[in-house]
Image (cartoon, grey):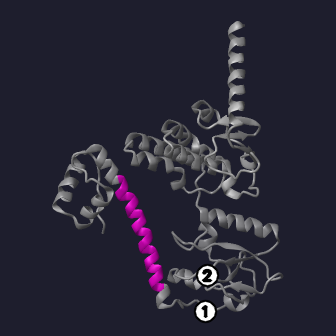
């Protein structure tokens, strides 16, 4: 009994010390995962805040024990702060700042639990967002930890069905809202510099059922996948002819909804639009290639420190020109199980 009382007294003392210490700092108050208050009241919300109060309990984000005990809240819809006031978003920013300020251990503990908060918030993160900690570990040459974290997070996301196709999610939500607002019509977004197929389909109003005598039926591929093709940036939204007889074209101009929706299915892109689309696809490919090369480089630095180029940019230059040293490095990398993929 004495041991129990001693333990409880210790917890009470620690709690009192934490409360007194927090009075010297800004405290962010979260309720159901959403920022609702900042003290002192005259201060602005900052990601550098050391203390947070989550659902009535105070936590010190410079204390590993508090970080590990921080509970996953029942996230509700956004308030006036939007996604930047969501606890998961704050913790993501905080984890990076802890590292910048030299609190690497505290940052690690927060990063290791971050994906759980992100998953609970249902904020439609992409898989690459969940893997942000893995990128940090990769750059720090903590490759085994990076691979372990990636496997853990991907397994969790797959098991719980969390990362879904965003295009399909938006489409399903649109269909649900169409039923809610008693409309059979949806409008497809429009923008310049898209592909030939999307250009023919965009900027129209479609019928979900196909029963409209005016508007065409929504293409089945959009209904099933939420997009025209992989990488498609178009979306659909509920539409009602009762409230509007106009729709935005790809230039952002209001045009007659019936004329726009029944126009010929032709590729009317200008030469500039076609060039811009090619530039967009090439830029996306470059970004994907850069990420692949970055993983290769840090694995080489870890496994072959004496043979690795001094910088990532130097590695990319020698790889792009396929120098003699690069080809030798490629062979050595293969011997230690590192596959280097050359561009087509």
Q: Quadrant of the C terminus?
A: bottom left
Q: Residue 254 or 208: which is nearer the viewer?
A: 254
In the image, residue 113 sits, relative to residue 280, either above or below, namely above
Residue 328 x %, y %: 17, 55
Q: Is residue 291 magenta?
A: yes
The residues tagged by marks 2 and 1 sit, at their Cα atoms, a distance apart of 12 Å
Residue 173 x %, y %: 71, 64
Q: Is residue 294 visible?
A: yes
* Pointer 2 residue: 202
Q: Residue 105 or 144: which is nearer the viewer?
A: 105
Residue 20 x %, y %: 71, 31
Instruction: Determine the image quadrant of residue 187.
Output: bottom right
* Earlier-in-chain disc, 2 versus 1: 2
Q: Which residues are magenta?
A: 274-295
Q: Nearer the viewer, mark 2 or mark 1?
A: 2
Instruction: Determine the image quadrant of residue 114.
Output: top right
Label for residue 12?
none
In the image, residue 38 sits, relative to residue 238, either above or below, namely above
Determine the residue positioned at 60% across, 74% down. Answer: 234
Label 1 crowd (10 A; few <14 / some 14-19 / many >=20)? few
Q: Residue 81 or 170: which is nearer the viewer?
A: 81
Q: Quadrant of the N terminus?
A: top right
* Pointer 1 residue: 264
Label 2 crowd (10 A; few <14 / some 14-19 / many >=20)? many
Determine the residue positioned at 42% across, 63% down. Answer: 288
Q: Is residue 159 visible?
A: no
Determine the residue positioned at 45% across, 69% down. Answer: 284
SS at circle 2: loop
Labels 2 & 1 near each other (Cβ < 8 A): no
């Amino acid at each position: 009994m004495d041991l129990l009382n001693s333990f409880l007294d210790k917890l009470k003392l620690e709690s009192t010390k934490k409360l007194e210490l927090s009075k010297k700092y800004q405290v962010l108050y979260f309720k159901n995962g959403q920022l609702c208050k900042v003290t002192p009241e005259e201060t602005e919300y900052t990601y550098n805040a050391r203390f947070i109060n989550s659902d009535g309990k105070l936590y010190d984000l410079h204390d590993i024990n508090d970080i590990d005990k921080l509970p996953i809240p029942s996230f509700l819809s956004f308030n006036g702060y939007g996604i930047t006031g969501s606890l998961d978003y704050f913790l993501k920013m905080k984890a990076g700042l802890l590292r910048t300020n030299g609190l690497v251990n505290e940052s690690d503990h927060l990063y290791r639990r971050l994906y759980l908060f992100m998953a609970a918030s249902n904020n439609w993160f992409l898989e690459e967002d969940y893997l942000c900690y893995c990128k940090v570990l990769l750059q720090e040459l903590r490759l085994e930890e990076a691979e372990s974290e990636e496997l853990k997070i991907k397994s969790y996301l797959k098991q719980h069905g969390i990362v879904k196709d965003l295009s399909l999610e938006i489409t399903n939500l649109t269909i649900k809202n169409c039923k809610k607002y008693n409309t059979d019509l949806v409008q497809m977004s429009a923008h310049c510099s898209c592909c030939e197929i999307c250009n023919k389909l965009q900027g129209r109003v479609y019928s979900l059922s196909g029963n409209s005598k005016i508007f065409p039926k929504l293409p089945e591929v959009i209904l099933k996948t939420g997009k025209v093709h992989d990488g498609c940036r178009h979306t659909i939204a509920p539409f009602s002819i009762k409230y509007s007889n106009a729709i935005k074209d790809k230039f952002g101009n209001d045009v007659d909804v019936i004329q726009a929706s029944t126009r010929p299915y032709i590729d009317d892109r200008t030469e500039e639009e076609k060039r811009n689309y090619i530039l967009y696809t090439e830029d996306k490919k470059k970004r994907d290639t850069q990420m692949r090369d970055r993983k290769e480089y840090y694995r080489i630095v870890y496994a072959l420190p004496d043979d690795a180029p001094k910088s990532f940019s130097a590695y990319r230059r020698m790889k792009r020109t396929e120098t003699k040293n690069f080809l030798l490095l490629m062979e050595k990398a293969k011997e230690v199980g590192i596959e280097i993929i050359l561009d087509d």
